[in-house]
Amino acid sequence: MTPDGPTLSPFSRYQKFVVGLLATLQFAVIIDFMLMAPLGAMIMPALSMSARQFGLVVSAYAFSAGLSGLLTAGFADRFDRKKLLLFFYSGFVIGTLWCGLAASFETLLLARVVTGIFAGVIGSIVLAIAADLFAPQSRGRVMGVIQTAFAASQVLGLPTGLYLANHWGWHAPFLLLAAMGAAGGLVILLVMRPVVDHLAVRQERSAFAHLFHTLTTRRHWSAFAATALLTTGGYMLMPFGSAFTVNNLGIHVTQLPFVYLFTGLCTIVTGPLIGRASDTFGKLPVFYAGSAVTIIMVTIYTHLSNVSLPWVIAVNALLFAGIFSRLIPFQAMVAGVPEPSHRGAFNAVSSSIQQLSGGFASLLAGHIVLIGADGRLQHFDIVGYLLAATTLVAGWLVWRVHRDLVPQRF
C-alpha cells in the first residue's frame, strides 16, 4: 500500500477537461510573460526605446502582477471562482491585445501594466480551482499536468512566437495570443461549471479582515516562506542561463534552440510522471528526491566549461527534472494548507510572493554575477550555491507544512 492508498482513482471526463483547461490558461499566461525578452531586439528599434525603457516595460508587468495579487486577495473567496477567473482572464486578453496594438513606449508600458494586473491573479485562481475540485490524493497528477505549461511554452510557444514575429512583425504573437485567449474565454463561459462550494462557509465582514486573517494565520507562514525561497533560488539561475551556455559552455548561439527544445520535451514527459509519483509515493518523499537532484545538478551545471551540446542538454534536462520534482509536489501539498474559504486569498498572496521574490532574486543575481573581459560569466557558481542553500532551508519549511497536513494523508 502506498502512502496515499493502493490505487489512484481515475479522473472523470469533466475533471480531465478542467485539468486541460487550467493547463491551457497557464500556458497562455506564461507565454505572454516570456515573449517580451526574446522580442526585445525587435521592439526596441521599432518603438525607438532605450534599454532602460525596455527594462521598465518588463519589470512593470512583474510589479503590477505582484501588487494586484495582494490587493485582490481579500476579495478572492467572495465570488464563484469561475466568474472570477472569467473576469481576470478577459482583462488579460484585453491587455494582450493592447500590447499587440501598441505603437509607442508609453502605450506598451501601460498595456503591460494592465496585462500584469489581470495575469497576476489568474495563476492563483487556477490553483484554487484545482484544490477545490480535486482531492488531496489526486492533486499531484493535476499539478503535474498544469506545470507542463512552462515546458510547452518553451517547445511550442516561444518558437512559434519568434516565427510569427520574424515574418509579420513583433505585434503578431500578441495578436494571435489574444485571439486564442478569446476562444479560451468562451470555453470557460460556456462549458466550465460554477465553483462555489467555498461560498457555503461564512466569511469575514470586510475584504481587509479576510486578507489580514490570511496573512496572520500561523500555519500559512511556513508555506509562504517556502514559496519565497523556492522562487528566489530558481530566478537567480534563470536570467543568466543562455549567456552562461554560450559564453562559458561554448555552445553556439544558433544551437540554443536545441537546448530549450529538448529540455522542454523532457519536461513535458516527466511533469505528469512526477505528479503521478507524488500521488503514489507521497508528496514529501518526491519533493526531497527532487531537491537532492536539484542540488547535485545545479552544482554540476554551474561548474561546467566547454562541453558538447548533448552533455549540456542532458544536464539541463536532469536539472529541470529536479526543479519540477520540487515544484509539483510542493504545489500539490500546499493546496491543502488553507481552509477552502481562504484558498483564493492564500493563493493570491502566494502569487504576489512569487513575483516579488523573483524580482529580488534577479536583482541579487545581477549583483553577484560579473562578465569578464573574455565574455565569460564569473561567480556563477555562487548563484548555484545559493540555490542549493535555499533548497535546504525550504526543505525544512516544507517538512513543517507536511507535519500540519499529516491528518489529510499528504
Image (cartoon, helix red, strand yellow):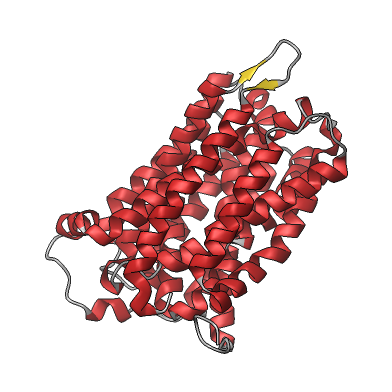
Residue sitting at x 60%, y 65%: 24
Residue sitting at x 17%, y 75%: 202
355 vs 290, nearest the viewer: 290
Q: Among all residues in the image, which is located at the extreme top?
A: 373
Question: Vertical placement of 132 versus 297: above or below?
Answer: below
Question: Vertical placement of 89 versus 139: above or below?
Answer: above
In which quadrant of the rendered view does residue 49 lie? top right
Question: Vertical placement of 46 versus 410: above or below?
Answer: above
Residue 265 location, x and y as percent?
A: 76, 58
* 161 lies left or right of 255: left
Quadrant location, the N terminus:
bottom right
183 vs 379, nearest the viewer: 379
In which quadrant of the rendered view does residue 103 lie? top right
* 359 lies left or right of 51: left
Quadrant location, the C terminus:
bottom left
Residue sitting at x 66%, y 51%: 320
Residue 10 location, x and y as percent?
A: 59, 88
